[in-house]
């Protein structure tokens, strides 16, 4: 399994390294995954993102590389777990609910982009 996935800390480091590899003077900012404490990322997609970052970073007119991670499907369904924790730290009762979260789409980030190269596969074929 390890070969198929990249841990969250390694993912962040790889993206930052992709910028530094092209130019140590350029700045890098990663947005959208600040609230993740742990995750596994697809290694193949991580590599593709690294190459995209390098391609952007090698442009001499670019001073900063910004990477924004957002849900591709704007409405995502999430489970909400409401837990009652006792003084000793054990869970006495839990209630499961569900909520749909409607996220902004990529247009929010692309408003002023002069050029967009959409390399995403069709939904369901990734």
Image: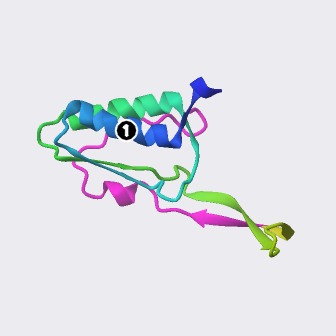
Is the stretch drawn in magenta largely helix, strand or loop?
Answer: loop
Graded by Cα atoms within 10 Å as few (under 14), some (14 to 19) or many (20 or more), the crowding at tag 1 reads many
Residue at 16% of width from left, 36% of height from top? 59
Residue 114 makes an appearance in the image: yes
Residue at 48% of width from left, 42% of height from top? 9
Residue at 61% of width from left, 27% of height from top? 2
Q: Which of these two is toward me, 60 or 91?
A: 91
The answer to which image quadrant residue 36 occupies is: bottom right
The percent position of residue 70, horizontal first and vertical second, equals: 48, 53
- Say whether residue 53 is left or right of residue 64: right
The percent position of residue 107, horizontal first and vertical second, equals: 38, 56
The magenta stretch is 97-126
Q: Which of these two is toward me, 9 or 106?
A: 9
The percent position of residue 64, horizontal first and vertical second, equals: 22, 48
Seen as rendered, the residue at the extreme top is 3
Q: Is residue 5 highlighted in magenta?
A: no
Q: Quadrant of the N terminus?
A: top right
Residue at 24% of width from left, 57% of height from top? 112
Q: Quadrant of the C terminus?
A: top right
Q: Identify the residue under disc 1.
A: 15
Q: Identify the secondary structure beneath mark 1.
A: helix
């Amino acid at each position: 399994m390890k070969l198929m996935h990249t841990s969250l800390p390694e993912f962040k480091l790889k993206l930052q390294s992709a910028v530094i590899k092209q130019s140590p003077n350029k700045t890098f900012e990663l947005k959208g995954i600040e609230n993740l404490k742990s995750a596994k990322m697809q290694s193949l997609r991580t590599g593709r993102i690294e190459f995209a970052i390098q391609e952007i970073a090698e442009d001499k007119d670019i001073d900063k590389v910004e990477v924004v991670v957002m849900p591709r499907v704007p409405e995502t369904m999430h489970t909400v777990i409401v837990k009652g924790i006792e003084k000793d730290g054990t869970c006495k009762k839990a209630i499961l609910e569900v909520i749909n979260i409607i996220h902004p789409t990529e247009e929010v980030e692309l408003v002023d982009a002069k050029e967009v190269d959409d390399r995403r596969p069709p939904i369901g074929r990734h």
